[in-house]
């Protein structure tokens, strides 16, 4: 027990608490250090960082500069998703939105606000979309009004991992443009962007690449994006213009988040040093498996079936009736870890993210903390 308390103290001294939330997440000190210098937006050295990042993102996506480009956009991840929707889906187009969580619903909200034609296919939060149903919708779309398909890869609401491979196959069979919100999976799960025919993939700085919040990015099919001039209903979120400007020499349209960009560049280097997406996937998966096993042993069960569970974030059902999340949250926070509340309306849950600078040892300590809380209250 003494050892346990000492480890917790050490953990807290490192930086008060570790984030077990799916972005912002715990970053390395070396990533944080990059932000101690103030850079100039039009300086060549700074613009080179942007160009380096764009190249590296294509490497992470395993696509070539010949076919794809990476465009960075100020703001959080949602800004990137909205930039894609408002730029690439014209007034003559229609998109099929596939949703099984809050992020899918956010896409629907964006479509409504942007007056984008859409059709919704939704399913329960704990089930994956049925690709036969999707095939049927496309088949029934006799006059081919549907031009685009939009979906979320890892639904961070629950931690469910949607089968992009199968849906991409159907999308390509019917020749649709495919937009994937891979916000919480890109960099942490291998995605064969070109092989699957993903035309636009969106993610952000503060998820699996392990940078700090401040911008999102889009991996875009160049041929498709080049057809989107003057489509955008928004000035700031015009993905096409952002691309054209950035392509010149790495200067962003409007002020860029310089500190975040520098930190992200370092985070990308560290992803490659770790061994790339494959190695990170293994670390995340092992963290996740360990977490679910250890909590199961003390009677805390995950909400999503194991076969659909992502290695990113897990939703856990409250272990007993009068479980007090706020008290639990503060107990765990005082011992060095910050968790996430649940996002479901019908079941009482909380969530634990295991991405970021988190290792097996952290998961062991966390589970011991949770165990000591639950044993003391039950
Ligand atoms: C994090 C996340 C987003 C973006 O959320 P922001 O708060 O705007 O960064 C979008 N989709 C998914 C699946 C996410 O996990």
Image (cartoon, rainbow, N blue to C red):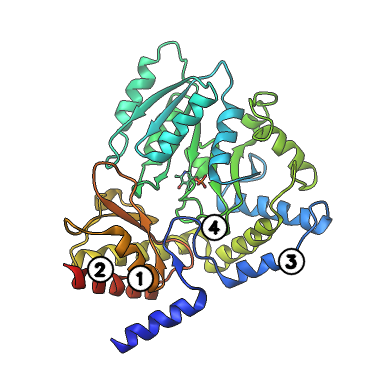
Q: Disc 2 designates what residue?
A: 294
| SS type, badge 1 | helix
Q: Position of residue 8 (x, y in %)?
A: 39, 79
Between 61 and 373, the one lying in front of the other is: 373
Q: Position of residue 144 (x, y in %)?
A: 46, 15
Which badge, 3 or 2, is on the more N-terminal residue? 3
Which badge, 4 or 2, is on the more N-terminal residue? 4
Tell me, for residue 209, which label it has, or none.
4
Q: Disc 1 designates what residue?
A: 363
Q: CA distance from mark 4 to mark 2?
A: 26 Å
Q: Position of residue 45 (x, y in %)?
A: 80, 59
Residue located 67% across and 54% down the image: 53
Name above or below for residue 107 compared with residue 295.
above
Which badge, 1 or 4, is on the more N-terminal residue? 4
Q: Disc 3 designates what residue?
A: 37
Q: Determine whether label 4 and label 3 are within 8 Å by CB.
A: no
Which badge, 3 or 1, is on the more N-terminal residue? 3
Q: Determine whether label 1 and label 2 are within 8 Å by CB.
A: yes
Dot in front, 3 or 1: 3
């Amino acid at each position: 027990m003494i050892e346990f308390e000492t480890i917790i103290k050490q953990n807290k001294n490192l930086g008060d608490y570790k984030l077990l939330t799916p972005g912002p997440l715990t970053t390395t000190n070396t990533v944080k250090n990059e932000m101690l210098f103030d850079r100039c937006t039009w300086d060549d050295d700074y613009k080179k960082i942007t160009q380096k990042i764009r190249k590296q993102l294509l490497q992470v996506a395993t696509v070539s500069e010949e076919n794809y480009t990476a465009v960075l956009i100020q703001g959080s991840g949602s800004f990137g998703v909205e930039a894609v929707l408002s730029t690439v889906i014209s007034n003559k187009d229609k998109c099929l939105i596939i949703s099984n969580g809050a992020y899918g619903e956010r896409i629907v909200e964006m479509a409504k606000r942007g007056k984008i034609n859409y059709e919704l296919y939704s399913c329960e939060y704990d089930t994956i979309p049925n690709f036969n149903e999707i095939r049927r919708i496309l088949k029934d779309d006799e006059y081919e009004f549907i031009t685009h398909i939009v979906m979320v890869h890892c639904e961070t609401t629950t931690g469910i991992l949607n089968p992009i491979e199968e849906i991409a196959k159907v999308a390509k069979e019917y020749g649709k443009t495919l937009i994937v919100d891979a916000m919480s999976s890109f960099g942490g799960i291998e995605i064969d962007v070109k092989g699957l025919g993903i035309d636009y993939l969106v993610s952000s700085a503060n998820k699996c690449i392990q940078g700090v919040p401040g911008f999102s990015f889009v991996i875009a099919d160049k041929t498709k994006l080049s057809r989107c001039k003057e489509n955008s209903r928004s000035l700031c979120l015009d993905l096409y213009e952002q691309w054209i400007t950035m392509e010149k020499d790495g200067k962003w349209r409007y002020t860029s988040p310089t500190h975040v960009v520098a930190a992200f560049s370092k985070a990308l280097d560290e992803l490659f040093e770790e061994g790339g997406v494959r190695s990170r996937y293994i670390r995340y998966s092992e963290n996740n498996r360990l977490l679910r096993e250890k909590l199961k042993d003390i009677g805390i069960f995950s909400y999503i079936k194991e076969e659909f569970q992502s290695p990113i974030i897990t939703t856990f059902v409250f272990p007993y009736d009068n479980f007090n999340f706020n008290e639990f949250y503060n107990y765990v926070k005082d011992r060095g870890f910050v968790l996430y509340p649940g996002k479901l309306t019908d079941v009482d849950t909380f969530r634990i993210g295991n991405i970021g600078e988190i290792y097996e040892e952290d998961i062991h300590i966390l589970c011991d903390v949770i165990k000591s809380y639950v044993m003391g209250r039950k």
